[in-house]
Amino acid sequence: MAKFALPKNSQVKDGKTHSACTPETKRKRTISVYRWSPDDDENPRVDSYEIDLDQCGPMVLDALIHIKNNIDSTLTFRRSCREGVCGSCAMNIDGTNTLACTKHLNDIDGEVDISPLPHLPVVKDLVPDLTHVYAQLAAIEPWLKTESPAPQRERLQSPEDANKLNGDDGHGPAACILCFSCSTSCPSYWWNGDKFMGPAVLLQAHRWLEDTRDEAAGERLDQLEDPFRLYRCHTIMNCTNTCPKGLNPAKAIAEIKKKMVSRKV
Ligand code: SF4
Ligand code: FES
């Protein structure tokens, strides 16, 4: 049987162990974090941090901020809103892509393993390079496109039409925060991410196709009519299973495929 090994410079090594606990610490937790810096020639490594939960907030992001502020200021990660609306703290926690700010430490058994979103280049530590996914997002032109003359005031929508975007339960495509947890959990995107748009971007394409004010549906579908951009989705469903906002990118992709078929009959 063929055996494969990672190139030597990408093998993940054991890293350093840091402890902020004392013999008096009652509630210890170990957080293991992927570390890699472009500033030296070292391999990636996994550092372990022992923290005192009584000194730290309840979420995984609180643990990372506690480590950065009190134990190791070199640890690098993105975060902004701290309440699940900006999407910047997306990372792989305990084997699942999710948001560090809404993931409770109590929901994880044992050691907490944290690594960057998979299958994206790493800028540093937990920060993935999103250049390519943003270029794909720009390619679907995620803004209102119209040909009819602009009205005196805004283009209105009925509540029913607005619900197609927002969803009756608030889980419609407009609720996407572009964290890219879904795209980076998708095997089709791992293997063909150069040409397959991936679930996050296709959910956005669906959002504009569903918008009753938009007048470029034909052009948008033409742009996706391609063996890779849309049809590399094989309904694996990792995207929907992992979405930390409870959205359904797999269904959005299926809706685009239905539109492709119905415009031909
Ligand atoms: S669909 Fe969900 S997982 Fe995907 S980018 Fe939007 S919020 Fe993130
Ligand atoms: S910090 Fe904004 S979603 Fe987590």
Image (tube, rainbow, N blue to C red):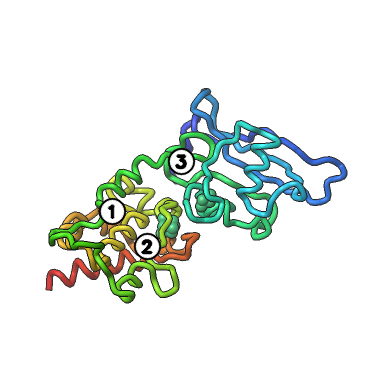
Indicate left or right for 250 with 58 as reference: left
Q: Is residue 130 above or below residue 93?
A: above
Looking at the rendered structure, which numbered label has been put on residue 142? 1
Looking at this rendering, what residue extends furthest in the right direction? 24
* Percent coordinates x, y for residue 40 in the rendering: 53, 23
Q: In the rendered structure, which amino acid carries the disc numbered 3?
A: Pro
Report the residue at 59% width, 35% height from top.
45
Q: Which mark is residue 174?
A: 2
Which residue is label 3 attached to?
128
**Which image quarter holds the C terminus?**
bottom left
Of residues 188 and 84, the one drawn nearer to the viewer in this rendering = 84
Q: CA distance from mark 1 to mark 2?
A: 11 Å
Q: Residues within 10 Å of mark 1 (few under 14, many from 20)?
A: some
Residue drawn at 46 percent across, 32 percent down: 7
Q: Determine the residue located farthest toward the front in the rendered image.
A: 152
Tag 3 secondary structure? strand
Instruction: Assess disc 2: are there few (<14), some (14-19) or many (≥20) residues with their C-alpha within 10 Å of its C-alpha.
Output: some
Horizontal and vertical percent for residue 235? 36, 64
**Secondary structure beneath disc 2?**
helix
Question: Which amino acid type is marked by label 2?
Answer: Ala
- Say which mark, if any, is on residue 73: none
Q: CA distance from mark 1 to mark 3?
A: 22 Å
Query: Amino acid type of disc 1?
Result: Pro
Local crowd at mark 3 within 10 Å, few (<14), some, or many (≥20)? many
